């Protein structure tokens, strides 16, 4: 199959999952155990719309120059963790566009998605429950892993060190609101609430903190407005006792710490305000900290606990100055956009700072 | 006893001895703590709780609160002991100020005696936990030192090295953390304990379910000559003064996956739905929330991040099968939930 044909087929498959009228989209939304159907549906539409044929063609064209002369993989292992279809689609799309045979290890918590995506791709994927059988680890000449850091480390140890591998591990996102005036606009609150609400804040592109360059009053005003937005979202499903326990601990830390707290007792969502201090993050599930910081110069210190683990930064009231941008990129950010667009990256997004296709190829010298 | 109101101390002593009503004592402690613990008073106020009708109405504080605030009822500078959680790199340590150690000593020794000092069981006690004077901030070291001093036969004490265990010919009770015991028996696989020896295993399952398999640990004990009937698990934490045991030495159930932790007679456990804070149904899994009236100088109702299965006990109280501790990790990125690679 030509690369053009692969782009076409992949775009068709993705469009089925992002189309609320398609039965595969409906099945994915109805049967996913972790999310309310409407939450999954709106998330798929928002995040997959840029992954159309135009977007995928742009990725291939952009990567062409980087891949030139490289040898693409023949067999790529794709190990999926987590529960979010867009990150799984990305992990499969990269080796697929390079023409590799793909073996997908389905996520232990979400066996549904790979089967549905395979059906959308006309059963082109070999989906397995386990990768424990002999030989597959040594036969694979590339790998893509989505999961927690520990699992990715474990996978790295099972394949040869020189094997090209894309590792998408623990990451987090923040929002940055540049000024008290910006914090007090309804559009800022709406876009931040959108970025929290999509997929119940489970992805690495969902902010866990909003940093307001302004006063405590500015942060509180934004918290109030974001709360009003979140209160209108459909009910979320339980994320399991471990996560819900962490959310409870987060709520209790707010109670004991005298922080301003918004949110219902059943933990459907929660907003807390902090003044100064360093990034703490939240367990997700529509829980957010809005932190007032005095000046942008404090930013490196504030985000120090997540340095190297930032995935994206949503900026309200931008653009950022080049020095701050460089600092955020060095802290890991590979996507800096307006908050409401955080979870809708185009295929050309260098996920975690990598060239997604070129990173799976190999180069050689032949003197 | 100094540091606490005499009437409360007297009530607690009677409660431990089985001569006082739990509801009366815990209500009195609640009023005392709400009036004298600023942080706790704030929690009660923010929860909208003033009067209580039952111990179940007492507002809990989360165990993490001991990391974020001074949870002392009274003046922390007068504390007789300050116990701290071990913590991990980068974490804040939880701090539990104990104004007066005597209630802790009385209650912990009563629980220890009931679970571990059965007729015919060894009184020689050897510990893999350091001595209390070397670990002044460890509540566990304090309890173990008390127990050895009070109940131990001559020769009882902390071990310099686990390999010293092979010197003993008479049966003994070995006290250790799960990690300490695992390390001991994994490093010394040829080690055999004298017949009749027993083990008290505590803590050590923190962090992740998959870190330690308790059945594997019991296999190590078996190999060392100690049957599961002679291994008792103790559940406690820095933030609690009472302990929960999962059996009695000599008659503990061999099915370790079904071991039930039972509160001391003066303590209670609720197993709660994390979202609603309602009790889960018997057999269901939830967050453990403990009532410990021995916590006079801090807060008696503690919500933990521990996960357990509710078991209805014959006496009308609840016990639990311990499952693990929620990791609480906040940086999960695209994988909020763990992936199992195999």
Image (cartoon, rainbow, N blue to C red):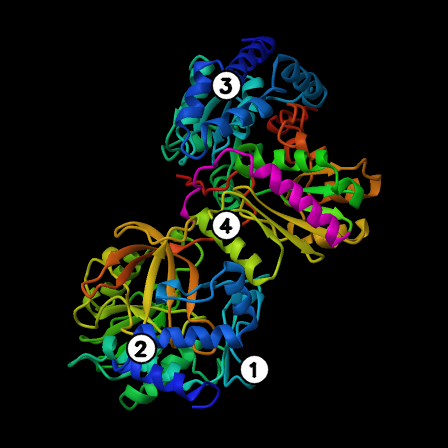
How packed is label 2: few (under 14 Cα within 10 Å), some, or many (20 or more)? some
Q: Classify 10 Å Cα crowding around label 3: few (below 14), some (14-19), many (20 and above).
A: many
Q: Nearer the viewer, mark 2 or mark 3?
A: 3
Q: Give the CA separation, mark 3 to mark 4.
A: 30 Å
> Residue drawn 31% across and 69% down?
B244
Q: Are marks 2 and 4 in contact (CB under 8 Å)?
A: no
Q: Can the viewer see residue A205 in this picture?
A: no
Q: Position of residue B78 (x, y in %)?
A: 55, 86
The residue pinned by badge 1 equals: B75
**Residue B167 drawn above or below residue A25:** below
Marks 2 & 3 on one chain: no
Q: Of helix, strand and loop, which one carries label 2?
A: helix
In front: label 3 or label 1:
1
A98 left or right, relative to B246: right
Residue A213, placed above or below residue A312: below
- The label number, if any, that marks residue B165 in the structure image: 2
Element assignment for label 4: helix
Could you tell me which chain the residue with mark 3 belongs to? A
The answer to whether residue A11 shows anywhere in this view is: yes
- The numbered mark 4 sits on a residue in which chain? A
Task: Please give the label number shown on residue A17.
Answer: 3
């Amino acid at each position: 199959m030509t690369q053009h044909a692969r782009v076409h087929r992949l775009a068709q498959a993705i469009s089925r999952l992002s189309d609320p009228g398609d039965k595969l989209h409906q099945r994915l939304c109805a049967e996913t155990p972790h999310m309310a159907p409407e939450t999954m549906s709106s998330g798929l539409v928002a995040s997959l719309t840029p992954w159309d044929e135009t977007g995928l063609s742009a990725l291939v064209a952009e990567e062409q120059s980087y891949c030139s002369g490289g040898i693409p993989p023949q067999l790529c292992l794709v190990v999926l963790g987590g529960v979010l279809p867009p990150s799984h689609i990305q992990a499969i799309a990269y080796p697929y566009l390079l023409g590799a045979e793909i073996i997908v290890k389905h996520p232990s918590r979400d066996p549904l998605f790979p089967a549905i995506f395979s059906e959308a791709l006309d059963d082109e994927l070999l989906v397995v429950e386990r990768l424990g059988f002999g030989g597959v680890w040594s036969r694979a000449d590339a790998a893509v892993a989505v999961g927690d850091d520990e699992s990715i480390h474990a996978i790295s140890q099972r394949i040869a060190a020189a094997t090209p591998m894309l590792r998408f591990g623990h990451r987090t996102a923040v929002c940055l609101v540049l000024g008290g005036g910006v914090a007090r606009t309804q559009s800022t609150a709406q876009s931040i609430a959108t970025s929290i609400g999509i997929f119940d804040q489970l992805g690495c592109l969902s902010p866990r903190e909003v940093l307001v360059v302004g006063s405590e009053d500015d942060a509180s005003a934004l918290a109030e407005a974001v709360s009003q937005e979140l209160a209108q979202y459909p009910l979320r499903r339980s994320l399991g006792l471990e996560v819900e326990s962490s959310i409870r601990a987060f709520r209790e830390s707010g109670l004991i710490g005298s922080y301003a707290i918004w949110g219902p007792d059943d933990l459907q969502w929660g907003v807390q305000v902090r003044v100064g201090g360093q990034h703490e993050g939240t367990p997700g599930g529509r829980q957010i900290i809005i932190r007032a910081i005095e000046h942008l110069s404090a930013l490196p210190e504030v985000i120090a606990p997540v340095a190297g683990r930032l995935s994206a930064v949503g900026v309200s009231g931008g653009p950022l100055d080049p020095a701050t941008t460089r600092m955020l990129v060095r802290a890991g950010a590979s996507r800096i956009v307006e908050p409401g667009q955080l979870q809708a990256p185009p295929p050309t997004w260098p996920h975690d700072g990598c060239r997604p296709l070129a990173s799976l190829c190999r180069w050689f010298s032949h003197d | 006893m100094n540091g606490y109101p005499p009437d409360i101390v007297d009530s607690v002593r009677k409660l431990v001895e089985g001569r006082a009503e739990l509801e009366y004592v815990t209500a009195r402690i609640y009023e005392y703590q709400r009036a004298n613990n600023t942080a706790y008073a704030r929690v009660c106020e923010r929860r909208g709780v003033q009067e209580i009708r039952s111990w179940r109405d007492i507002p809990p504080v989360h165990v993490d609160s001991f990391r974020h605030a001074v949870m002392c009822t009274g003046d922390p500078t007068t504390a007789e002991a300050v116990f701290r959680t071990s913590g991990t790199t980068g974490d804040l340590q939880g701090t539990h100020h104990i104004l007066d150690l005597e209630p802790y000593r009385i209650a912990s020794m009563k629980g220890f005696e009931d679970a571990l000092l059965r007729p015919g069981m060894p009184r020689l006690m050897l510990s893999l936990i350091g001595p209390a004077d070397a670990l002044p901030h460890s509540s566990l070291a304090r309890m173990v030192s008390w127990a050895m001093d009070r109940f131990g036969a001559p020769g009882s004490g902390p071990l310099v090295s686990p390999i010293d265990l092979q010197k003993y010919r008479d049966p003994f009770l070995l006290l250790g953390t799960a990690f300490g015991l695992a390390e001991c028996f994994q490093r010394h696989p040829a080690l055999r304990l004298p017949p009749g020896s027993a083990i008290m295993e505590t803590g050590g399952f923190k962090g992740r379910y998959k870190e330690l398999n308790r059945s594997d640990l019991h296999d190590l004990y078996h190999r060392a000559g100690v049957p599961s009937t002679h291994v008792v698990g103790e559940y406690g934490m820095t933030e609690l003064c009472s302990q929960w045991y999962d059996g009695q030495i000599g008659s503990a159930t061999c099915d370790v996956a079904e071991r039930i932790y039972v509160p001391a007679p003066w303590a209670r456990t609720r197993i709660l739905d994390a979202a609603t804070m309602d009790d889960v149904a018997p057999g269901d899994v939830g967050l453990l929330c403990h009532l410990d009236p021995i916590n006079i100088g801090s807060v008696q109702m503690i919500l933990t991040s521990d996960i357990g299965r509710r078991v209805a006990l014959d006496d009308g109280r609840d016990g639990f099968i311990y499952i693990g501790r929620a990791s609480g990790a906040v940086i999960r990125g695209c994988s909020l939930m763990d992936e199992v690679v195999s």
